[in-house]
Image (spheres, rainbow, N blue to C red):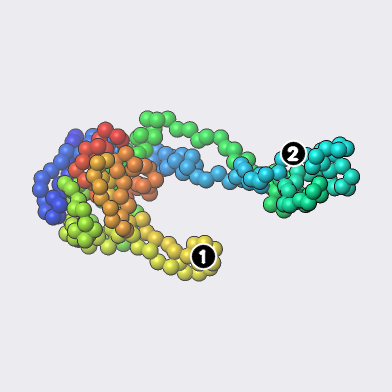
Amino acid sequence: MKLKATVYDAAGNKKGELELPAFFANPIREDIAAKSFEVWKLMNQHLYSGYVEAGKRHSASGTISHQRHDWKGHYGKGISRVPRKTMNRRGTQFFWIATEVSGTRGGRRSHTPRGLRSPRKMNEKEMRLGFQSALAATSQTKYVEKRYSSLHDIKHALPIVVESMPAKSKDVLSVLKKILGSLHELALRQKSVRPGKGKLRGRKYKSSAGLLLVRGNDEKISMKGLDIKSAREVSIADLYPLGRLTIFTHKGMEELAHVA
């Protein structure tokens, strides 16, 4: 069974129909979509580890000599053999500062986290099925209403496909208002100040995800407040939880048939 979607022109008027890729008609596997998102999140998270060159980015070299008559040696100075950098000198008298080792100011940290982890693996076909399920969920009203608590009784046919988007942000906004109607309030990313102590802990602002606009690789669309990705850039992270409010351009939908 092949599904079709209504195509809107750049002014927001209905222009025709477009045959959707075959995976839009497949059953949605919520379990595989959740698993593929967990794999993506694990493999893209920042590892807890120290910087490789931390505490080592200075001119101090290894242990300085304690032999007699060696130039720039420690013999007779009564100081330890730790690496030192020269701040200034007067003849053969040097003013040194110990560096590099963990017991010195600005030295490396001892026993840093190594940042090692075992990779989380997932079959390519399984990963593709999870991604296709997430794309297919954008075309089903029950998943969209489940994700957005403020949405009830969506009257628009999903998915929404636009022939092309205008270049100016003002024109893009007018097209969104005409196509989405009351849904356009969710289209733009909303940013607000977080209540409570989170403001003191690096989490001052919180924002909604906003609308996802999937464009063709050659199309150039830019607008603040929208999450704009090309067909090759879209990942499971952009679509999960299932039911992301999404608009596809005509070229973006055609390219997804080959990418997904």
| Residue 237, quarter of picture | top left
Residue 257 location, x and y as percent? 25, 35
Q: Which residue is mark 2?
A: 62
Residue 141's spot in the image, x, y percent?
26, 51
| Location of the N terminus (image quadrant) | top left
The reply, left or right, for residue 87 in relation to residue 75 is: left
Question: Which marked residue is nearer to the observer: mark 2 or mark 1?
Answer: 2
Amino acid carrying label 2: it is: Gly
Quadrant of the drawing holding the C terminus: top left
Kindly tell me whether residue 213 is visible in this rendering. yes
Disc 2 versus disc 1: distance between alpha carbons? 46 Å
Front-lying residue, 89 or 26: 89
- Are there few (<14), some (14-19), or many (20+) residues within 10 Å of tag 1? few
What residue is drawn where x is 87% and y is 42%? 75
Residue 191 percent coordinates (x, y): 38, 64
Please tell me which residue is depicted at 35% across the width and 46% down the height of the picture: 239
* In-image side of 111 versus 7 (left or right): right
Q: What residue lies at 30% left-to-right and 50% top-to-bottom?
A: 228
Q: Amino acid at mark 1?
A: Gly
Q: Nearer the viewer, residue 105 or 94?
A: 94
Q: Quadrant of residue 175?
A: bottom left
Disc 1 on helix, strand or loop? helix
Q: Is residue 168 left or right of residue 95?
A: left
Q: Residue at x 13, y 55 (%)?
A: 11
Find disc 1 in the rendering and name its residue. Answer: 198
